[in-house]
Image (cartoon, grey):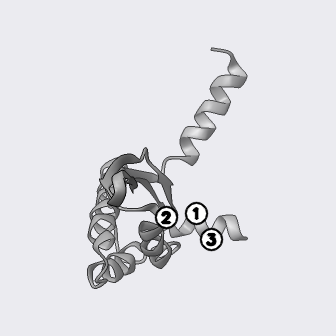
């Protein structure tokens, strides 16, 4: 590996040092319903987001709460320290479509109606608040 490439790789690794993420794939919920819940916590502090998700009555909130806890645990494992309140925030959260299951439902007069069972993939990225303040300045 060349010197320039090594320096750029080391710089990129250092930038990614405080960032941790978690992915949840093939969730059997429509992406639209999951995005409603993801929009509630986007940009929030992690422990505040967990409180919002815990008391939300949407079915997707329980899955997203577990995913945010996983991202938090990944950050703690990566940095070898416990996260304090007010230290981390959800920097990025996005919901993508997963492959659809297509089924047929019988209909009158020999027809069939198509049922599309949608699924989604969710990615949560957790970052420190100090990094957020440095990028804004």
Q: Quadrant of residue 67?
A: bottom left
State yes or no: discs 1 and 3 in contact (Cβ < 8 Å).
yes
Q: How many marks?
A: 3
Give the residue number, with chain letter if any, for mark 1. 131
Per the image, label 1 sits on a secondary structure element best described as: helix
Q: Is residue 71 visible?
A: yes
Q: Callout 1 environment at 10 Å: few (<14), some (14 to 19), or many (20+)?
A: some
Residue with the most extreme top position? 1
Q: Does residue 9 sit above or below 109 in this rendering?
A: above
Q: Quadrant of the C terminus?
A: bottom right
Give the residue number, with chain letter if any, for mark 3. 133
Q: Quadrant of residue 7?
A: top right
Distance of label 1 from label 3 (alpha carbons): 5 Å
Q: Callout 2 environment at 10 Å: few (<14), some (14 to 19), or many (20+)?
A: many
Q: Does residue 53 sit above or below 92 in this rendering?
A: below
Percent coordinates x, y for residue 55 in the rendering: 27, 85
Q: Which mark is residue 128?
A: 2
In this view, the residue in front, 12 or 28, is: 28
Q: Quadrant of the N terminus?
A: top right
In this view, the residue in front, 19 or 35, is: 35
In this picture, residue 24 sits left or right of residue 35: left
State yes or no: discs 2 and 1 in contact (Cβ < 8 Å).
yes
State yes or no: discs 2 and 3 in contact (Cβ < 8 Å).
no
Q: Callout 3 environment at 10 Å: few (<14), some (14 to 19), or many (20+)?
A: few
Distance of label 2 from label 1 (alpha carbons): 6 Å
In this view, the residue in front, 99 or 114, is: 114
Per the image, label 3 sits on a secondary structure element best described as: helix
Distance of label 2 from label 3 (alpha carbons): 9 Å
In this picture, residue 57 sits left or right of residue 111: left
Percent coordinates x, y for residue 27 in the rendering: 33, 54
Residue at the (42%, 77%) spot, across then down: 86
């Amino acid at each position: 590996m060349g010197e320039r490439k090594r320096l750029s790789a080391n710089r990129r690794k250092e930038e990614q040092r405080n960032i941790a993420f978690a992915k949840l794939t093939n969730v059997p919920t429509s992406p639209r319903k999951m995005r409603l819940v993801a929009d509630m916590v986007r940009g929030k502090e992690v422990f505040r987001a967990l409180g919002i998700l815990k008391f939300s009555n949407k079915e997707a909130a329980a899955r997203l709460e577990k995913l945010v806890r996983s991202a938090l645990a990944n950050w703690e494992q990566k940095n070898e320290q416990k996260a304090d309140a007010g230290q981390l925030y959800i920097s990025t959260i996005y919901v993508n479509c997963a492959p659809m299951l297509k089924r047929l439902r019988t209909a009158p007069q020999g027809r069939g109606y198509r049922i599309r069972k949608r699924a989604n993939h969710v990615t949560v990225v957790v970052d420190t608040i100090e990094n957020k303040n440095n990028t804004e300045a």
